Amino acid sequence: MYQKKEIDKAKAYEYYCKGLNSKEIGKLLDCSFRTIQNYMSAENWKHKRKVRK
């Protein structure tokens, strides 16, 4: 299960970088939007996306 979680987190980040919000990503990955928000916060996705551009 741990491995699936990491894969989903990577997919979620890619979707986030494409401009999707947490609710849209949650629906695509069949998980809670709150889980996605936790990933976003814990790994500072907002900053990573800005630097990535």
Image (cartoon, rainbow, N blue to C red):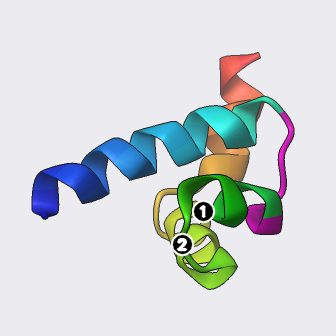
Q: Is residue 1 left or right of residue 23?
A: left
22 falls in the magenta region: yes
Residue extending farthest to the top is 53
Label 2, residues with CA under 10 Å away: few <14, some 14-19, many ≥20 = some
Q: Which residue is mark 1?
A: 40
Whole-number angstrom distance, CA of label 2 to CA of label 1 = 14 Å
Q: List x then y, in percent, for residue 12.
A: 56, 47
Q: Is residue 45 left or right of residue 4?
A: right
Q: List x then y, in percent, for residue 20.
A: 83, 46
Amino acid residing under circle 1: Met
Task: Please tell me the numbered disc located at residue 10.
Answer: none
Q: Which residue is mark 2?
A: 31
* Along the line of sight, the residue nearer the viewer: 41 or 18: 18
* Along the line of sight, the residue nearer the viewer: 49 or 13: 13
* Along the line of sight, the residue nearer the viewer: 38 or 43: 38
Say if mark 2 contacts mark 1, CB within 8 Å. no
The residues colored magenta run 19-23
The structure residue drawn at horizontal position 59% and vertical position 80%, both measured from the top left corner, is 32
The structure residue drawn at horizontal position 47% and vertical position 57%, both measured from the top left corner, is 43
Nearer to us of marks 2 and 1 is: 2
Where is residue 23, by image quadrant? bottom right
* Along the line of sight, the residue nearer the viewer: 24 or 38: 24
The structure residue drawn at horizontal position 50% and vertical position 38%, both measured from the top left corner, is 11
Label 2 element class: loop
Q: List x then y, in percent, for residue 36.
A: 59, 68
Where is residue 40, by image quadrant? bottom right
Label 1, residues with CA under 10 Å away: few <14, some 14-19, many ≥20 = some
Which of the two labelled residues, at mark 2 and mark 1, occupies the earlier sequence position? 2
Q: Is residue 2 left or right of residue 37?
A: left
